[in-house]
Every structure is written in structure tokens, then in C-alpha cells.
Image: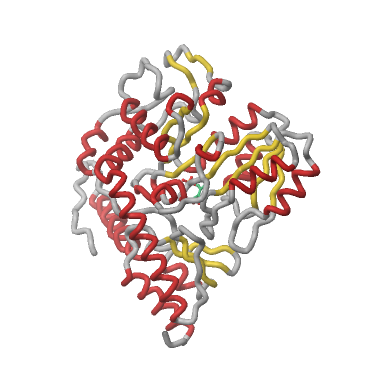
Amino acid sequence: MSLTKKIHCDKRLTSQLQQRLQNFLSFVDQEADRFLGYPCNRFFDYTPLYPFLSFPLNNVGDPFLPSRYHLNSHEFEREVIGFFSALTHAKPEEIWGYVTNGGTEGNMYGIYLAREIYPEGMVYYSEATHYSVPKILRMVHARNIMIKSTVNGEIDYQDLAETLRIHRDVPAIIFANIGTTMTGAVDNLDRIKQILKDNAITHHYIHCDAALGGMILPFVEHPPAFDFNAGIDSLAISGHKMIGSPIPCGIALAKKCHVDRIARAVEYISTFDTTVSGSRNAITPLFLWYAIHSQGIQGFRKIVRGCLEMAAYAVQRFNECGIPAWRNENSITVVFPKGPDAIMNQWQIALQGDMGHILVMPHVTKNQINLLLADITAAKEVKP
Ligand SMILES: Cc1ncc(COP(=O)(O)O)c(C=O)c1O
């Protein structure tokens, strides 16, 4: 599928520069056809919102409070937060949130709140955790211990229990994965809470990294515990992953009582500073709002069901070709032993050690899966 669009540039750009942009458009258009390895949905259409790109919109400040900067989309941001609060069973009167620039910022927010509540607390996270988390822990100077992971990518509960037992005197900050990056594994919150209880650790904080899982589990038939129903303290979801957006974005949700501890009044913007960034994107809340209203719960449910079915198809086809692919329950991440480098690169397959994965996002088709398999098997000279 090729974009025939011609880019119309300001005449001050030389024809060479205009051609460069045109070439770049052709490049991304082509590459998007082999975009299987990362969890970003490429199916979206926000063209009706393009007029908003003509204004210096900025969501600086707390979306729930008035600000002197009137060119904001706080009203829409609040509705987006309301949608995600309901989706994650948060009690509206107890929860606060904002639209972030991605999952990483949402995770940073959760860790920041936890560290403010328990400055001496120890953060426990599994080795399957996203690479940005150890960096965040360094940035906020949080004490931390990495816990082993099991083969499928869940936190190793035995290692967690043994480690917590040694540090029973220290408040525990649990960084739980609701869909790990490489294998889509979901840490079992019930088991984690039981381990905290067994060790009589009453001072604890649980943050859930639901970057991708936060937009899958609400739509499956029997989801495991993953949200505020399970008594968690904060949660982060990416917006550009399952929903899709040309600009990275996400959602941070946290208990209001935790956020109140970090809020600071700022005269310059005449509101409270409760977010990580000062200036904040005002377009992405509009994108999310638009997607929420155009898809609705039923639309998202259908999209997720379609992805899960396609992921099951991918596993079956890989296995038929003699490649031992697998996936976790309720996951659209199909894991397989990595193939030849050139093929992995051509299809933008994320790798870790000997492992590769495809992310069966809404744009992934049977044809693409079969083309990838044909490339792998041809390269290995193995007949499908
Ligand atoms: C489990 C997990 N957490 C966090 C992130 C970071 O999210 P973002 O890229 O939206 O900052 C990712 C990204 O893939 C992820 O898979």
C-alpha cells in the first residue's frame, strides 16, 4: 500500500529539501508494511483533528485545575482520565491522573510517588522489566533490588519472597509488570500481595506497568488481577500502543492521597504542579479522546479479540513451520527463537538474547505473518 500524497511545502524550502521530505514519506510508508516487532498500532486516523495543530496548545499544569494558560485541552484530558479510571476500576473520588508522553513517564510518576511516600523504601522489580525502569530508579535515587524472572517472563515469586524476607524492616515498593516487553507476561498481584502479607510488610506501595496490558486485559473474558480492584497504588498505560497515535502518549493514574503529597502551587501558571513535565502535549489527549469516542468499549473489545485471534494464528503457523513459537495467556506477543539477522531487521523484529517476538497489533495481517515465515524458512532453507 503506497501513499500517493505529495507534500506541499513552503516555497522557501529548496526543491532538494522538498524532495528529501518526499523521500522520507516514501521510506516510512514502505517500512510501515513490515512493522511487526513493536507494540505500536499503525491504524488510526486523526485527520479531523489537524486544525488543532495550528495553535500553540499546551496542557501545562494540573488538568483538574484552572490555569492562566487557556490554550489547553484539559477538558478532554479529564474525560480521557475518566475513561481509563473506569476501565481500571478506580474510584473517581480517590483517583487522579494525567496524559503523559508515554509509558516511561507514567512509570516514573508511580516510582516518584512511591519514593516520596517511602524515601527509605526498597523497589522490587523483575529482570523482565522494561529497560527504562532501572534508569528511572537511578534518576530518583530509589533503593532497588532486581528479582529473577521465570521462563515465561513473570516475576519469580520464590525469589521475591526470599528477598522480601531479608528486608522485612523496609517498606516495599513493588513494580509489577502487566505485560512484559518481551513476552507479555503478567505478574500475579494476588501472589505478590500474599507474599507481602506472609512477611507482615504492611508498609507497601504497588505500581503496575500496564503499558500494553492495560489496553488488553480490560477487554478479555477472564482477566487476572491487574488494576485498582486489586488494591494497587498507581498504574501506567501507553496510549500509542494499542490505541495508536502518531505522537507517543500514555496515561498515569494514581491514588489522589499520594499525589497530594507532591503537589506544589506555582504562581507563574496559577495552578498546581502535579505532573512530571511542565509544558505538556495537548494534542495527544485529543487523539485519545477521539479514539475513545470513535471506538467505544465495544470497538476496543472487538479490536483486542481480533489481535488475540491473530496471535493464536501466528503461533500455529510458526509451529507448523517447525519454529517453536509461544505466547502467554491473553497476550498478543508471539515469542520465537530469533531468525537470521537480515530477516529480523527487515521485519523490525525486537530481539533479546536468542529471543525474538512479533507484536500482533491491529494492523498485522495473516499475509504479513506468512510473508515473514516464508522469509525465515527460505533463509534457513527449511520447507514450511
Ligand atoms: C512493559 C513496558 N513498559 C514500559 C514501556 C515504555 O513505554 P513507552 O515506550 O510508552 O515509554 C514499554 C515499551 O515498550 C513496555 O513494553
Relative side of 53 to 141, left or right: left
The residue located at (75%, 41%) in the rendering is 199
Relative side of 60 to 55, left or right: right
Relative depth, front residue between 384 and 220:
220
Seen in the picture, residue 320 relative to 356 is either above or below; the reply is below
The residue located at (34%, 35%) in the rendering is 285
Q: Quadrant of the C terminus?
A: bottom left
Seen in the picture, residue 300 relative to 264 is either above or below; the reply is below
Q: Quadrant of residue 200 in the image?
A: top right
Relative side of 170 to 354, left or right: right
Residue 376 x %, y %: 44, 78
Seen in the picture, residue 366 relative to 236 is either above or below; the reply is below
Q: Quadrant of residue 150 in the image?
A: bottom right
Q: Quadrant of the N terminus?
A: bottom left
Relative depth, front residue between 217 and 72:
217
Q: Quadrant of residue 377 in the image?
A: bottom left
Residue 13 x %, y %: 25, 44
The residue located at (32%, 55%) in the rendering is 303
Residue 94 x %, y %: 48, 26
Residue 328 x %, y %: 51, 62
The residue located at (50%, 78%) in the rendering is 323
Relative depth, front residue between 68 and 321:
321
